[in-house]
Image (cartoon, coloured by chain):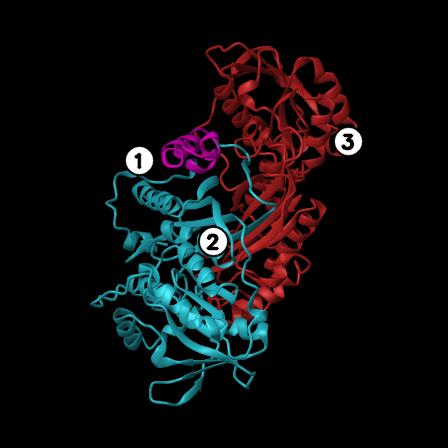
Chain colours: A red, B cyan
Amino acid sequence: MTHSSWQLNCPVQLGGDEQRITLAHGEGARLTRRLIDDEIRSRFRSGPLDALPDAAHVDVTGNRIAVTTDSFVVSPLFFPGGDIGSLAVHGTVNDLAVSGATPRWITLSLILEEGLPLPALGRVLDSFAAAACECAVEVIAGDTKVVPRGAADGMFLNTTGIGTITGSPPAGPQTIESGDVLLVSGPIGRHGMAVLCAREELALEPAPRSDSAPLTGVVETLLRAADGNVRAIRDATRGGVSAVLHEWADACELSFRLQESRLPVSADVRGASELLGIDPLYVACEGTLVAAVAPGVADQVIESLCSRPDSSGAAVIGSATDRTICPVTIRRTLGREQPVDEPTGAMLPRIC
Amino acid sequence: MTHSSWQLNCPVQLGGDEQRITLAHGEGARLTRRLIDDEIRSRFRSGPLDALPDAAHVDVTGNRIAVTTDSFVVSPLFFPGGDIGSLAVHGTVNDLAVSGATPRWITLSLILEEGLPLPALGRVLDSFAAAACECAVEVIAGDTKVVPRGAADGMFLNTTGIGTITGSPPAGPQTIESGDVLLVSGPIGRHGMAVLCAREELALEPAPRSDSAPLTGVVETLLRAADGNVRAIRDATRGGVSAVLHEWADACELSFRLQESRLPVSADVRGASELLGIDPLYVACEGTLVAAVAPGVADQVIESLCSRPDSSGAAVIGSATDRTICPVTIRRTLGREQPVDEPTGAMLPRIC
């Protein structure tokens, strides 16, 4: 790996050799402790992490918790609108939020490649800490491993999010009924397109910018406005809106009909998608959700969402129908109805 | 990476190209779903994982939980006495157990390198599932990422363990007093030496075998026998017994004196350590704990531990004294007392 992504794309100045991760940082002895003291504890001092226990002990309210886990292998580590640190927090918090939980705690596990510049690590950890603070999740446990040069690509993060459950979570996609309305909370495909353009160093103007952001507030607004009539919510990450709808179609045994004219797509993503020949329906979001709601509440839900700055682009994009031969179809702007295929993969690797 | 560790050491037969992980397995679309259905859900069907929710919701007893996280980058993936799958479960369960918690749930996040043979993945997942079953922890959340050939070394695992807390956890190393007794639950250094010998393909006879095993029962026995007089318990992983004692010496501001003649070391580890010039004190265990107990209960604790098959080699190894210039010293078999240095690292990379 002479040209790993962090070497090509790392925006921080590289210092001398003493400013890089070495194998000795990963072996549990003095250098590991110094790395953890300097880089980790200095940033997460207030919580249980400061004492570096084998396991953090925290008090829960209620008797039900929500748990989600994700690994982040995004390349490059830094991209317009975010970096692997903020992305890890947002992705984790959003998985909890769309499941109906209140995000409370997060773990942070690092796999570092020998040679990674310490300033790049520091910048990612700063971003992680800031995002965790913004999302009101406490970093309660962590781990750091170092692998030899060439055995990883810069750094991988893993997070587990834990939330508490107080209200009633959405019933789930199996409860979607024919006639239910599909909506998104904003323009689609922004995250995947931003990462792809950054990785390929495409100098598009305007450059697509990731939508990476917490969805906690948006979910709260949605649940309140729908008053018990939300069937399912999902953050449309890997595979984009298409992947969510294919999974839901399987769960409820219905079909979904979309209208291309109603799909919110930002100008930067539209430009990139036309240039690259990639439909934004297949491209990951990291701060935009898909929801299925009962038809009677769709208008009030959209009105409430549009009143928030972080979901001002919310829109109805289609509806559920009885099952047809295609699980998902789209009426194109020119009027033809086409199936939305489920790609087998390989279009957009390493976008989260 | 033409000679990554899984290529050199994978004990499963490699099939044709269709039997390997491809980038398309990681992109959230059809192949990802097939991989997850075939490899993950088939093995963890009984729990919340079967429905593949964004976040698993589970009921907790009591109002306090314990959380720990670890990444596993061990090389090779398979070694005498275990593999990365069983190791991940044991390491996670043990972090919870030594903190005084009852392990209940575990997450499993996979980072797979393109080209990894599917049979190797299957074997690791079988091992993970069997160990989770043995340890009575339920696999409740997961994630799978694929990175291009050369961007990871075969596979990395990440786990987060969650436990419930019912009794009183040990008070912690800061409560250790001068005169307290140090003990281990069995022979030390077995895991690190087993991995090192497997990686370097040293054909030692007998080949060191990892001690990877759950410590839940051993901790229960220890706590019961000590009747409230356990100060601290730790599984001696990265950095071995030495790293634990250096950390504890910092916490309690005392020194520890060990006696080499009392340190339990198995014949296979002793042979390898003499050949390689590595003191077992610095080598990781994955099923052996260190504990500090009040002197009055040491005999009854050792007797109870020795009555269990999985801690039959338990032994007192030293005691705490007032602080001297060296945080940890050892009286060698020939009678001289020496400082136990804290190595800066670089002796044993990637043993967990």
Rendered view: B65 above or below A33: above
SS of the residue under disc 2: strand
Q: Nearer the viewer, residue B301 or B323?
A: B301
Chain of the residue where label 1 is placed in the rendered structure: B
> Quarter holding the N terminus of chain B?
bottom left
Residue at image mark 2: B71
Q: Quadrant of residue A212?
A: top right
Chain of the residue where label 2 is placed in the rendered structure: B
Task: Kindly report the distance in space between the C-alpha atoms of the residues bearing marks 1 and 3.
Answer: 48 Å
- The residue shown at (37%, 40%) is B21
The disc placed on residue B18 is 1
Magenta extent: B25-51
On the image, the x and y values in percent for residue B166 come to: 54, 50
Lateral position of residue B269 relative to residue A217, left or right:
left
On the image, the x and y values in percent for residue B177 come to: 56, 76
- Indicate the amino acid at tag 2: Ser
SS of the residue under disc 1: helix
The local crowd at label 2, few if under 14, some if 14 to 19, many if 20 or more residues have their Cα within 10 Å, is many
Q: Nearer the viewer, residue B144 or A93?
A: A93
Residue at image mark 3: A308
Can residue B345 be spotted in the picture? no
Q: Main secondary structure of the magenta part?
A: helix
- Indicate the amino acid at tag 1: Glu
Q: Nearer the viewer, residue A262 or A161?
A: A161
Task: Kindly report the distance in space between the C-alpha atoms of the residues bearing marks 1 and 2.
Answer: 28 Å
On the image, the x and y values in percent for residue A229 come to: 66, 19
- The single residue placed furthest to the left in the displayed view is B205
Nearer to us of marks 1 and 2 is 2
